[in-house]
Amino acid sequence: MIPNSETSVVTIDRFIIEQEAMFPEATGELSGILYDLAVAAKMISSKVRRAGLIDILGAAGSDNVQGEHQQKLDVIANVIITKAMDHGGRLCAMASEEEEGVIPIPPQFRCGKYVLLFDPLDGSSNIDVNVPVGTIFSVLRRVTPDGGPGTVQDMLQAGAQQVAAGYVIYGSSTMLVYTTGHGAHGFTLDPSIGEFLLSHQDIRTPNIGKYLSVNDSYERYWSEPVRALMRRYRGLDMQREPMNVRYVGSLVADFHRNLLGGGIFVYPANKQAPSGKLRLLYECNPLAFICEQAGGAATDGRQRLLEIVPGELHQRSPLYIGSRNDVEIATRMLEADR
Ligand code: AHM
Ligand code: MG
């Protein structure tokens, strides 16, 4: 890699250090969590990149807590993150979409003041057809007293309490996007030097989007207000220009495209899935935090997503996330659903 004379090269490590220096009260512990996550992301990226070359495709033969079939790479990504994060002394517990309960910190390691929630490999059913997949993470400060192991109570906080969140997309390049509440910043992995380099500082999402991402094979199970909303986005009720429909079926890929280009990702409740499909703590909350930091919005159709107080770890939530105006239309039109 040879930088051109107009750009400066900023690694994710340097960016994290510089951000931390802006907050004298910071202890460096959150920065440490972000470094470790960036390392885990590189390790998962290298596995995903080799997925077509080595014989690790296909199901691992076990089901996750939602009864869904796990792919082998889900299991691998889950182990990579757990092992990269369990010994830094900064976390007191973890929770993963792929594991039923709280993942404790092994007794030989110190317990810190944060908890980490993650979806190790979202969209993994797409791996064997070479469609982008992603990792999503959320960091919360514990609410139980410092010192001992973390508990589920530390995890069941509204998304507005997140201190950091991010995702990694394993696409045509691998990118990591994160926020600590001071803007959303994106880094692209340069595989030749093994570094995430700052490529998208302070991402701003357009107020009015051009993309609509929804799986409309569920239309027959939607409520009438949801159907009307989708007709609105498509311009069928003549109230607006139609949006372009783009649905990868891999949340991180759909969200990332819409974040950069403007748009809305929608996974409504439906009669078969009364709370939708996506998990509040591992998928919806971290993306909502990033989206708001980029000037967008997120709702479950009733309230600001980040204000929902979760009742359980694997809770699902309907999701309407993206450009501010498009989310406002959803909020307005779904009033009839309340
Ligand atoms: P997963 O966590 O089991 O991979 O499922 C989540 C994925 C998301 O990436 C995607 O947005 C959604 O499932 C697609 O679901 P559907 O096939 O119902 O449209
Ligand atoms: Mg998932």
Image (spheres, rainbow, N blue to C red):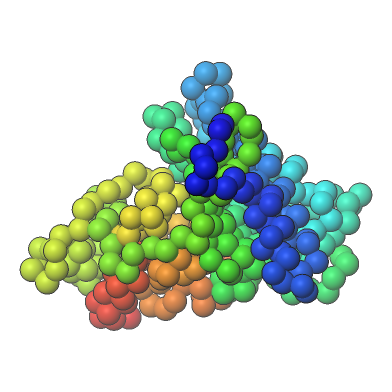
**Farthest residue in the front direction?**
5
**Residue 250 in the image: x percent, y percent?**
41, 45
312 w.r.t. 211: above or below: below
Q: Where residue 324 sits in the image (x, y, percent)?
A: 35, 71
What residue is rendered at 32% in x and 59% in y? 262
Residue 153 horizontal side relative to residue 131, left or right: right
Q: Residue at x 85, y 70 (%)?
A: 146
The extreme right residue here reads 108
In front of the other: 24 or 136:
24
Residue drawn at the location 88% of the way across and 56% of the way down: 110
Q: Looking at the rendering, in which quadrant would you find the N terminus? A: top right
Where in the figure is residue 237, as x and y percent of width and height?
A: 9, 68
User: Can see residue 33?
Assistant: yes
User: Where is 258 relative to 206, above or below?
Assistant: above
Q: Residue at x 32, y 80 (%)?
A: 338
Which is nearer the eye, 242 or 222?
A: 242
**In this orientation, which residue lies closer to the viewer: 223 or 284?**
284
